[in-house]
Amino acid sequence: MKFILSHAFEILLVSSSLTNNVLSFTPSLSSSLSKSLLSMQKELNNRQKYAHSHLTILKSTHEKEDTKILKDEAPCYDGICSSEPEPPQSSHSHQGQATQRLGVQSGPTVWSEFGRIASSQEDIANLGQGFPDWTPPKFAIDALVESAVDVTHNSPHQYTRTAGHPKLVNELAGRYSKHLRREIDPMAEVSVTVGASQALYLALQTLIQPGDEVILFEPFFDLYVNQIKLAGGTPVYVPLKFQPYNDNDDDDDNDKTTITPGEWILEPQSLVDKISPKTRAIILNSPHNPTGKIFTRSEMEHIASAITDHASPQCVVLSDEVYKYIVHSPPREEMEEEEAAQIELTQQKNGDDVHHTGDVNGFGEKYKPTICQGHVHFASLPGMWERTITISSAGKTFSATGWQVGWAIGPKDLIAPMHQLLPYVQFCASTVVQEALARALPKADLPYEGYASYYEYLKAMYTRKRDLLGSALKDAGFAVPDYDITPGGGFFIFARIGKKISDAIPPERIMAPNVAAPGNIARKDWALCQWMAEEKGILCIPASPFFSEETVTGINGEPLSDQFVRIAFCKTNETIHKAADRLMKLSEEQTVVDETLISEKSS
């Protein structure tokens, strides 16, 4: 509040100074312009007097309330969150249908609980919430400033087109035309929303009728579940199989002294088994939150086949692709196909030795390797454009999660209902931010910080952060994917809890009552994360909230959700180094404990 007040006074002084400077030149200006400037000065003086009096009142009120501690009771998801939700005062019979569909959701959640812990410890190494803790690239900030100070007749300070700012939808249509190898109609096949979450919400609201089923691949981002319920649908879970690198790792006779990493794979039959006549949608998230998995082209082709062969014609895929520019370990098959396409498209039709680029999409444009290498757009698969709504946003790509501009791309018959619903949800996403993004997108294609483009820089930056944190996690006793073997994307490591780190958890914390935990019980993953946050100064997110209550017993007879934690590496190097140092201390402490136990046994 003090920051806001001081800057408000500064703005008033600067405004007055600027106007006075301009007025000093009035002798050289036309009479009409001089009168206009004098009128502006008079108006500004009046506004200054008005603002000054109100700011004085605000300052006085703030000083009186300085000692008050306000309690945040609003729920939140995977962001800055320190809330402590309380049950609503009204009875269930007086709640609206949407609230009733969510069920009893009024208590603390994983986000509010760990957000509370983070906010109570100033020096914590926060690897929990999924947002970068640095500012967006300079070209993006410049674009935002340029948009904010634009005072031309096209100034973006008023409402824009509800379905999307014309400048932005044209920019997006041009890009997705290349990605999907088809011409995208910017006015009919693009919808701009307040973040990707709203795009998903609107898509589900326009697709789902009560009783319809929506398939989720498990583990999943937990926001999906309640959005499905809000639309009146029923979530149906298709578990991804965790396959350890060591085949003996899931052997019941294994002594559990060695816990190996592995990868998450989709078994085609497990999807087919869950498709029913009620299946209306499948939510596909690649790169995947929380595991970092990249669905391979072959896995996506299996999904496409399952839809074509087993689902009703009304079944639609909602492809959440917010991490598509953060493919830090591309699938080899995708890179090989990309290279082969480059070679094929640069050879003459007649097979001679002269190479040239060719027209690949019918638009008269030359072939260029995709700027999101390693990512497969599901809608680009044969026959899937008509059955896919592609969802994405700017937040993750440009480290600007507060911009809250998302979009949906798809055929007119799927996007038109979203267009119809948009005016009743909000009139439009921020015009200023949409304008800023439209200006920033072309700049991201240019050389940046010594790389061919911003996207190449982004990939390299996240690869370095991933490796730095991954090495520290392995030293501490976690099993981390080998990204030379396993493709990876996004900015999360889904680390498996090793025996060494598992033994370090105070026994009294495991299975202890906890109202924020699933089932109100702090299982091993939750107990570990809470202990590390409260006593070791390292905040991670437990895996259990990303799994359904119906999750079956996993490897070694232990629920699969107990065995993992989600760790974000979208953090500054300072934060990652701090976490690495504390993980090292944790490892050293456990080594001392182990040596003491061995010594006691031998004696």
Image: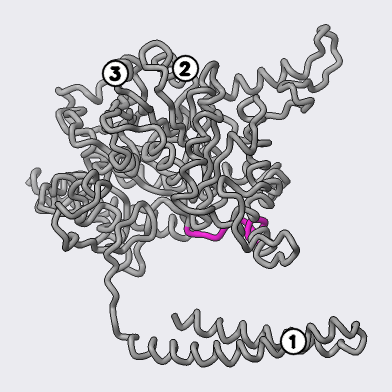
Q: Earlier in the sequence, mark 3 or mark 2?
A: 3
Under mark 1, the amino acid is: Ser
Identify the element where label 2 is drawn: helix
Q: Which residue is mark 2?
A: 301
Q: Which residue is mark 1?
A: 39
Measuring from the top left, give residue 68's x and y in whole percent.
29, 82
Viewer-nearest residue: 298 or 46: 46
Answer with left or right where residue 439 lies relative to residue 568. right
Viewer-nearest residue: 289 or 44: 44
Identify the element where label 3 is drawn: loop
Q: Which residue is mark 3?
A: 276
Measuring from the top left, give residue 561's x and y in whole percent.
23, 37
Magenta stretch in the rendered image: 133-141
- Is the C-beta separation of discs 3 and 1 under 8 Å? no
Answer with left or right where residue 559 lies relative to residue 71. left
- Is the C-beta separation of discs 2 and 1 under 8 Å? no
Q: Nearer the viewer, mark 2 or mark 1?
A: 1
Residue pictured at 77% horizontal, 27% vertical: 366
Q: How is the image coloured?
A: one colour
Q: Earlier in the sequence, mark 3 or mark 1?
A: 1
What number of labels is visible?
A: 3
Residue pictured at 63% horizontal, 40% vertical: 172
